Amino acid sequence: MNNITDTVKHLIIINVVMFIGTLAIGGLAFGENTLFYDWFALHFPKNPAFQPWQIITHMFMHGGFMHILFNMFALWMFGTAVERQLGAKKFLFIYISAGLGAVLFQLGFYYFNFLPGYNELINSGLSNEMVVEMLNTGQTTANVNDTQLGILQNLFQIFHASMVGASGCIMGILAAFGMMNPDAKLMLIFLPVPIKAKYFIPGIILLDVISAITGQSFFSPSNTAYMAHIGGALTGFIIMWYWKKTQFNKNRWN
């Protein structure tokens, strides 16, 4: 059993404290938003609830007990090994960078789906103020036609989307682990077949890509931010590829 490293331990403590805060402030019933959640989860930037600090704070928020349990288990298992091999500073750099990469990919995906419909509404004669007001309140005016209403309903889901969790950070750590330990054997809890990391990790990322494109969930809840997973993993891969190319010789990572 791995002894936990200092940075991983501190990250787990921060995540647990933030989760307790989510439970304590606002009287959370699992699955419902609280004041703490509203402050620190990452909201869609066009939503009035968005604040710049949420780009960082959402990485330490979780939506339920199983969410934080699985993420912290993965952080302990893979983060400890990566921190031992890279050291605390490089480990933390990958962790935060992967979280930011996850934000970039997920928000980019949201905007890719939001902007065409938004522009169509503006071109149809609705003002920006009217569109934002209707998206914010969920109430439409009498002069909205059926086509506009359908677009508004689609945009409403993105406008009120929120993002929480350390999954993007952990996917970056997982990618780093796989690059440093390609022959390490890993298993899914519900598929107890050992698979080498160099096959296992790309396979997990591929499933996230398929889920993001099709909307079909394989191993995760249907509300999982798959593009965030992809962004975190890709960021971790790029950082490790660059370090391997410029800073490390082939026999040594530190």
Image (spheres, rainbow, N blue to C red):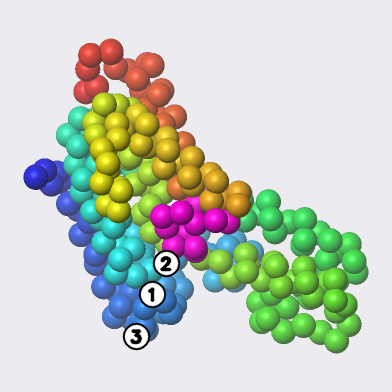
Type of amino acid at the residue the image marks with label 1:
Phe
Left or right position of 144 against 91 = right
SS assignment at label 1:
helix
Rate crowding at label 1 as few (under 14), some (14 to 19) or many (20 or more) other CA atoms within 10 Å: many
- Residue 225: in magenta span: yes
Left or right position of 103 against 150 = left
Q: Residue at x 35, y 36 (%)?
A: 200
- Give the position of the C terminus as an image quadrant: top left
- Give the position of the N terminus as an image quadrant: top left
Pointer 2 or 3: first along the chain: 3
Task: Determine whether label 2 and label 3 are within 8 Å by CB.
Answer: no
Residue 160 in the image: above or below residue 229: below
Residues shaded magenta: 215-227
Q: Alpha-carbon distance for marks 2 and 1?
A: 6 Å
SS assignment at label 3:
loop
Residue 171 position, x and y percent, is 38, 44
Q: In the depicted view, which residue is nearer to us: 206 or 170?
A: 206
Residue 241 in the image: above or below residue 48: above
Q: Which residue is mark 2?
A: 40
Q: Which residue is mark 3?
A: 27
- Residue 78: in magenta span: no
Residue 33 position, x and y percent, is 44, 77
Q: Alpha-carbon distance for marks 2 and 3?
A: 16 Å
Q: Which residue is mark 1?
A: 36
Pointer 1 or 3: first along the chain: 3
Rate crowding at label 3 as few (under 14), some (14 to 19) or many (20 or more) other CA atoms within 10 Å: some
